[in-house]
Amino acid sequence: MKYLVTLFWTIIYGQVIGYMGAALTSTQDNPVNALVISIIFGLILCVLPQILKPASQKKG
């Protein structure tokens, strides 16, 4: 469940950041690009803690 919440909020924040970034750079907002980038970033956030666990914690 925590992974779904993390992905949900990364999508929301990704859209907001994409919109603000487009407004600040005076370019057209592309929500599809923001969606893809935020999903990739969210997946990295979900997988990274599992990869970085010390070996002693992975067995239990």
Image (cartoon, rainbow, N blue to C red):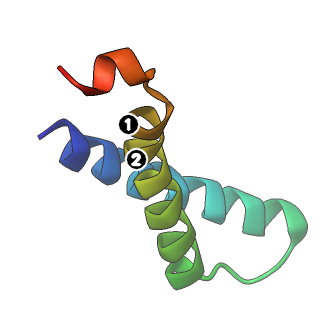
Q: Is residue 26 left or right of residue 44?
A: right
User: Real-space Cα distance between discs 1 and 2?
Assistant: 6 Å
**Element carrying mark 2:** helix
Q: What residue type is labelled 1?
A: Gln
Which residue occupies 41% across, 56% down? 43
Residue where numbered disc 1 is placed: 50
Query: Badge 1: few (under 14), some or many (20 or more) residues near its Cα, within 10 Å?
Result: few
Instruction: Report x, y in % for residue 32.
Output: 50, 83
Which residue occupies 43% across, 33% down? 49
Which residue occupies 29% across, 27% down? 58
Q: Nearer the viewer, residue 23 or 50?
A: 50
Q: Nearer the viewer, residue 35 or 53?
A: 53
- The quarter holding residue 20 reads bottom right
Q: Which residue lies furthest to the top in this view?
A: 56
Is the C-beta separation of discs 1 and 2 under 8 Å? yes
Q: What residue type is labelled 2?
A: Val
Q: Which of 54 and 18 is in front in this view?
A: 54
Quarter of the rendering occupied by the C terminus: top left
Instruction: Report x, y in % for residue 38.
Output: 51, 61
Q: Residue furthest right?
A: 25
Query: Badge 2: few (under 14), some or many (20 or more) residues near its Cα, within 10 Å?
Result: few
Q: In this view, does 27 lie to the left or right of 60?
A: right
Residue where numbered disc 2 is placed: 47
Quarter of the rendering occupied by the N terminus: top left
Q: Which residue lies furthest to the left in this view?
A: 1
Which residue occupies 50% across, 31% down? 52
Number of numbered discs on residues: 2
The circle on residue 60 is: none
**Element carrying mark 1:** helix
Instruction: Report x, y in % for residue 11.
Output: 41, 58
Rendered view: 49 above or below 31: above
